[in-house]
Amino acid sequence: MRRREFLMSLAAPAVAQPKRAPNVVFIYADDLGYGDLGCYGNPSIRTPNLDRLAAEGSRFTQFYSAAPLCSPSRAALLTGRYPVRSGINFVLFPDSTGGLPDSELTIAELLRGRGYATQIVGKWHLGHRPQYLPTRHGFDFYFGIPYSNDMSLKTNTVYDEINRDAGRPPRPPSVYDRYRTLPGIPLMRDEKVIETEPDQTQLTPRYTAEASAFIRKSAASARPFFLYFAHTFPHVPLFASEKFRGRSRRGLYGDAVEELDWSVGEVLRTLAELKLDENTLVLFSSDNGGAAGLGRHGGSNGALREGKSTTWEGGVREPFLARWKGRIAPGQVRQDVASTLDVFPTLARLAGGAPPSNVVLDGADLAPLLWEGQGRPQPDFFYYHNGELRALRRGPWKLHFTGGPKQPPKTELYQVETDIAERFNLAERHPDIVARMQEAIARHQASFEKAPTQR
C-alpha cells in the first residue's frame, strides 16, 4: 500500500452529509499580477466576470501564494504544505526527471476518496513523466499542458523579443540547448499526448469548453465534483483568440487577461444554467505575482514591491475571490491574512471531515472567514523561495532577509498592512519585534526536515 493510501485510510470518518456534497471549482491564473483585475483597481483591463465574482462573494486583500514561482506554488496549493516539505523548490523543466512525490496527498486524492469526480484542465507543472502526471495524483481526468507554455524551442524565443524591448543584448544560442532534442509543448488528455505545439491562441477557448463539459457531465451524475482549472495565461508567450486580440487598452497582455475573464464567465454561466450556484464553491487566485521585469509582456502588481521570483509582496500577494451563493455573504472585502495553504484544510472539511491526522498541514480552515461569520487567529506565514526561507509575516509585521553571495545579510522589518510597498524599514526602531520573529523562525525551521529537492 502506498503511503498516501495508508494516510487516506487513517482519515477522520466523514460527518453526516446532505444528499450531494458541495461542488468545488478552483480557477488558477498563471503570473497574474495583484493589480491586473478591475476589482483590484486596474484602470485599463476589463474583467467584468471576475468583478462580479468578487461582488457576489469575498475579495481578499492579504492573500498569499506559498511560493513566487510556478511549480512550488502549485505543490503548496494541492498539498496544503510548504513546498520544501515535498521537495518542489524550483521550477520543473521538460528535461526534469523529478516531480511531486508519491508520498504527498493532494486535494484531488482526498476529495476523490470522499466520492468526488475530479478533473484538472490546463497547466500541471508538477512533473511530466508518467509517474507524476495528474492522473497519478487523484485526478480522474486531465486536459492540458504539463509545464509552462514557454518551454520549447519554438516558444522560448519570446525572451529575445522581451530583451529587444528593453534594449538588452540577445541571449546566446546555448540557452536553447535544453530544448533542441525535445518535441515541443505537449497537449495531453489524461496520460496521452494528443498534439505537439498546439495553437496557443485556442488554448483558453479549448480549456473552457473542456471545463464546461466536465461540469455538465458531473451534474448529470450522482457525484459532486472538483474542477481545478489552471489557466496557461497570462504567462508568456502571450496569446489571445481572434475574438479578443486587439480588444484591450493594455495590449496583448490585457487581451489575454480579458479572455481569461470571459472564460470565468462561461464557467459561471454553466453553473447557473445547471442550477448549481447554491451548491458550488468557486475560488479564484494566481500562482504568483506578475512578472514585473517583462515590460508590456508582464502584469501589474499595483503598489506592491517587485513581482514574480521574489518574496517581496508583489511576488506572492495574490488576488483571491470566493463565491458560494447562499453561504458566503456578497460584497465582502476581507483584510485577514490567508494563503493557498488554507485551501486543502478548507476543502477537506467541506467534503465531510478533517484531513488525515498523520498529514502535517501548514494551512488552516477558511470556513470561519468565508461562511461561518467568525474570525480566526491570524497565522504566521513563511515566505519560501528556491527552498530557502526568506521572510515571515506575523500580524501586521513582515521580517525580510536580504543579501547573497556578494552582499552581507540584512534584516528588514516592514509594517505591511500600511506600508504595502515595503518602503520603510523599521528594524532599528523595533528590535524587540525583530527578536521575537527571529525566535519564531528558528522554531519553525527546527520543526521539520526539508525533503530532497526534485529536479
Image (spheres, grey):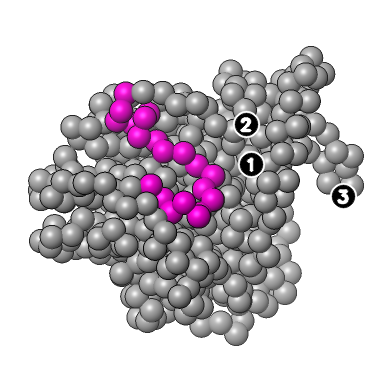
441 with respect to 287 (left or right) = right
Of marks 3 and 2, the one in the foreground: 2
Predominant secondary structure in magenta?
A: loop
Say whether disc 3 or disc 1 marks the residue closer to the N-terminus.
Answer: 1
The kind of secondary structure element at disc 3 is loop
Q: Is residue 367 magenta?
A: yes
373 with respect to 164 (left or right) = left
Judging by the rendered image, the residue that carries numbered circle 1 is 383
Q: Quadrant of the N terminus?
A: bottom left
Q: Quadrant of the C terminus?
A: bottom right
Judging by the rendered image, the residue that carries numbered circle 2 is 393
Which segment did they paint magenta?
Answer: 354-373
Tag 2: Cα neighbours inside 10 Å, few (<14), some, or many (≥20)? many
Whole-angstrom CA distance, mark 3 to mark 1, is 20 Å
**Residue 190 locus on image (x, y percent):** 34, 75
Residue at (64% x, 55% y) in the render: 84
**Residue 273 locus on image (x, y percent):** 10, 48
Identity, as a three-letter code, of the amino acid under mark 2? Arg
Judging by the rendered image, the residue that carries numbered circle 3 is 405
289 with respect to 320 (left or right) = right
- Residue 376 seen in this snapshot: yes
Is 51 located above or below residue 29 in the figure? above
Residue at (79% x, 14% y) in the render: 429
Residue at (51% x, 62% y) in the render: 104
The kind of secondary structure element at disc 2 is strand
Residue at (89% x, 47% y) in the render: 406
309 with respect to 234 (left or right) = right
- Residue 33 seen in this snapshot: no
